Image: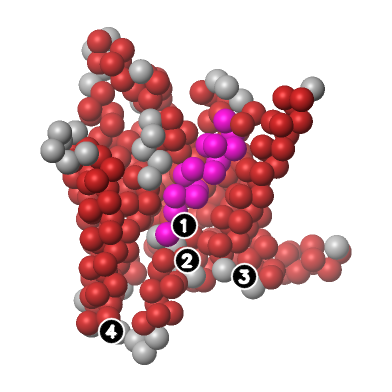
Amino acid sequence: MTAVIDQLIKYFQYPFVRNALVVGILIALCSSLLGVSLVLKRFSFIGDGLSHVAFGAIAIATTLELGKDIQLILVLPVTVIAAILLLRSGQNAKIKGDAALAMISVGALALGYLIMNLFPKSSNIAGDVCATLFGSTSILTLKTTEVWLCIILSVVVITIFLLFFHKIFAVTFDEDFAVATGIAAARYNLLLSVIIAVIIVLAINLVGSLLISALVIFPALSAMRLFKSFKAVMICAVIFSIVCTGAGLIVSILAGTPVGSTIVTIDMVGFALFSLIKMMSGRR
C-alpha cells in the first residue's frame, strides 16, 4: 500500500497528470449536473446521439489535418447545431424525437468512419477509430490552452446552470405547469441541449464518443437509488461522478488501462453498490 501511495505522489509531480485530473473532475461535475435533468426528462440518449455527431466532426477535422485547438473550434459549433436540430426535429409531428436521434447519430457515425477510410492520415485507421470511440491517452497529453479552454467552458456551464436552476427545475418536472406560469420551456430545453453539446465535446478526450452517455446516466441513476429530492439527487450525483472519475483516472494511470473504459467500469460498480444499499434498506 505504501508503494502505491509513493507511486501516486511521484505521478502527481508531473503537470500532465494534474491537468488530466483537473479536466476529468470538471467534466464529471458538468455532466452529472446536467445528467439529473436529462434522465428525468428522458433525454438520456441525446448525449449518445450528439457524441456520434462529434465523432463525424472529428473525422472531418482530422482529414483536414487541423490541430487539436482548431478541431475543437470546428467540432463544438457542429455539435451545438446538431443539438438544436435534434430538439427541433423532436417537436416535429412527422419525425418523432427517437427517429430523428437515430437518423442524425447513425448518419454522422457512418459518415465519419467513411471519411477516415477514404482520406486516411495514418496507417492505423482501426486504432484511430477505436481511440476516438472509446477514449485514449490523449487526456494525459493535454496542452495548457486545452486545459484552460476546458476550465473556461466548465465555469460557463456551471454558472448558467446555477443562474437558471429554478427554471430548469420547473421545466424538468412539469413542463406544462412551467409554461402556464410564464416560463419559456422551449427556450430552456434548447439551453439544456446546447449545454450538453458543450459537455460532449469536452468529454470526448476523456472517455471517447461511445462512452460519454455513461458520465451523464450513471451518476444520476445511482443517486436516485438513495435519494428522492431533486437537490439531494443532484448533490449525490456530483459527488458520485467526481469520485468515480478521479478513481478511474488514478487506476488507469497505475494499471495502464484505457481511461474511458476504466471510469465507466467504476461507475457501473458504484451503481451496483448503490443498488445493493437500496435493496438492503428496503428489506429493513
Q: How is the image coloured?
A: secondary structure
The residue lying toward the viewer, choosing from 48 and 106, is 106
Question: Disc 2 and disc 1: Cα gap in Å?
Answer: 8 Å
Q: Residues within 10 Å of mark 1 (few under 14, many from 20)?
A: many
Amino acid on which disc 4 is placed: Pro
The image position of residue 174, as x and y in percent, is: 35, 18
Q: Are marks 2 and 3 in contact (CB under 8 Å)?
A: no
Task: Confirm whether residue 79 shows in the render.
Answer: no
| In the image: residue 214, left or right of residue 282 | left
The span shown in magenta is 210-224
- Mark 3 vs mark 4, CA separation in Å: 27 Å
- Magenta residue check for 211: yes
Q: Earlier in the sequence, mark 2 or mark 3?
A: 2
Mark 3 or mark 1: name the one nearer the start of the chain: 1
* Nearer to me, 7 or 185: 185
Tag 3: Cα neighbours inside 10 Å, few (<14), some, or many (≥20)?
Answer: some
- Residue at 31 percent across and 12 percent down: it is 177
Label number found at residue 211: 1
Image point 29% across, 72% down: which residue? 113
Verify CB contact (< 8 Å) between mark 4 and mark 2.
no
Q: Which residue is mark 2?
A: 135
| Rendering quarter of residue 72 | bottom left
| 242 magenta-colored | no
Residue 53's tag is none
Quadrant of residue 187 in the image?
top left
Which of disc 1 and disc 2 is earlier in sequence? Answer: 2
